[in-house]
Image (cartoon, grey):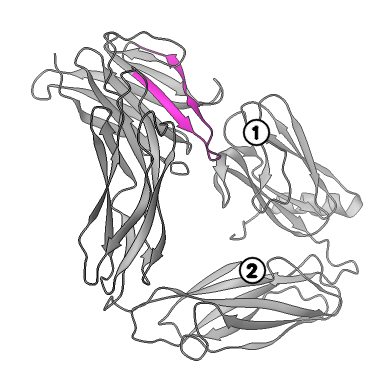
Amino acid sequence: MPARRLAPSLVLLAALAGAAHAVTHDVTVGPGTSFSPAQLAIQAGDTVRWTNAGGIHNVVADGGAFSSGAASSGGWVFSHTFPAAGEFPYHCEVHGAPGGLGMAGSVTVQGGGGGGTPGSLRFSNASYSVSEGAASATIQVQRVGGDDGAVSVGYSTANGSAQAGSDYSAVSGTLNWADNDDDNKSFQVPILADADDEANETVQLSLSSPGGGASLGSPAAATLTIQDDDAPSGAPGNLRLTSASYSASEADASVEVRVERVGGSAGAVSVQYTTADGSATAGADYVAQSGTVDFGDGDGATKSIDVLLLDDGVEEASESFGVTLSAPTGGAGLGSPSSATVSIADDDFPSECVADATTLCLNQGRFRVRVQWTDFQGGTGPAQALPYTADSGFFYFFGPDNLEILIKVLNACDPPFERYWVFFAVASNVAYTIEVVDTQAGAVKVYTNPAGVYAPATGDTDAFATCP
């Protein structure tokens, strides 16, 4: 991940503390969805202590090096000692994701200036990319955890899907560091362009044979991706779904999920598909399906997967299931999106709205609002409701001190609008489904968002044409 710029005062404090003795550094978890401080610089041998100040959280290293366990509430405390220099990003599994998305932080461990330690040698990244049109790719190698003595490491390339001599030139050699030298070193991989339209190709990179007492760090292996720059011509193309989300009513006999072929149509290709339960259950809400979608040579027509729906006659929240593409054949690639969520709106409408712990009744009680959440581990549940005004209210997923959704339903039945409007804002990257039901008209609107995506504020001024 990119290096973070640390405040000079923070670096100085960590250096002075580490010079005297091992130090314990405190990080506060929550009570919202952040770590404080989110970036911390310490010395090798120091300990970081995380204390939960409120909400359902945990601490998990992006690479799995440490973990506080399953997310939980309460005033838990978790400590971890960092014996060696390096960069250690981490996140909360409920409110964040690896790579600094959402609730995330990072610990930078300083090596303490050598002290008889030659350090370890590693790639600066586990993956690199370069355009096919570039002359070469620059690969950086780092020395971390110490700089005592002269050290060296061997490097080499090997074929992945790219072939030496036609896609790149194979290279090997040795990188050298002098005593007290911890600057990044680099080597070049020459790139060979061709005029063929093809999928992106990969070169495998490796470090070996560290010298001078140094060790191999992680990553000691990396992948270089050569991105094709040729216009499609005779390519088999990529297979993908036409949308990441589909919707249907429980009263519908089936829902149509569409598969398209893009970027080429040469040759016969196919892709497998399968359905999977979400909050909807196969056999009760829909019929589970799997199979193969086929395209002939030169066939670029969109294909359909019809998934049968089951009407259970029970008034319930909207439910959803997933459809996923996999295993393309004939040289075709898997495009994006390769998976989608299908939302089934219930058609068994209540005659009135009854407010409870998970239900808001808005606009004189006419509109029933419920929310279902799904976290990054696949856990799901109903959001808890907090009424605010006659037309608006809040929902929270994990604790009342962490409000995730503000929603309101407004009466705009006067000309020229003649609609009921739905407005909402979401402060979370957890997946959600919002269901708004007009209990008088028997109409429903469903709004969804996948995990890991921060949804924009939404104003649906065409939501319900059910006035008065």
Q: Please, what secondary structure does the residue beneath circle 1 have?
A: loop
Q: Where is residue 451 in the image (x, y as percent from the top left)?
A: 46, 41
Is the residue 351 above or below the residue 385 in the image?
above
Q: Earlier in the sequence, mark 2 or mark 1?
A: 1
Q: Which residue is drawn at 12% across and 25% down?
A: 417
Q: Residue at x 30, y 49 (%)?
A: 243
Nearest to the observer: residue 178 or residue 240: 240
Q: Position of residue 467 (x, y in %)?
A: 14, 17
Q: Please, what secondary structure does the residue beneath circle 2 have?
A: loop
Label at residue 124: 2
On the question of residue 338 being in view, the answer is no
- Magenta residues span 369-389
On the question of residue 251 being in view, the answer is yes
Q: Residues within 10 Å of mark 1 (few under 14, many from 20)?
A: some
Identify the amino acid type marked 2: Ser
Residue 231 appears in which quarter of the rendering? bottom left
Label at residue 168: none
Is the residue 46 above or below the residue 468 in the image?
below
Nearest to the observer: residue 252 or residue 128: 252
Q: Residue at x 43, y 27 (%)?
A: 372
| Quadrant (top left/top right/bottom left/bottom right) for the C terminus | top left
Distance between the Cα atoms at labels 2 and 1? 31 Å
Magenta segment: does it hold 33? no
Q: Name the residue under label 1.
A: 71
Q: Where is residue 242 in the image (x, y as percent from the top left)?
A: 28, 52
Is the residue 92 above or below the residue 1 in the image?
above
Identify the amino acid type marked 1: Ala
Q: On the picture, is 411 further left or further right than 10?
A: left
Q: Which residue is drawn at 34% across and 12% down?
A: 361
Magenta segment: does it hold 384? yes
Q: Main secondary structure of the magenta part?
A: strand
| Quadrant (top left/top right/bottom left/bottom right) for the N terminus | bottom right
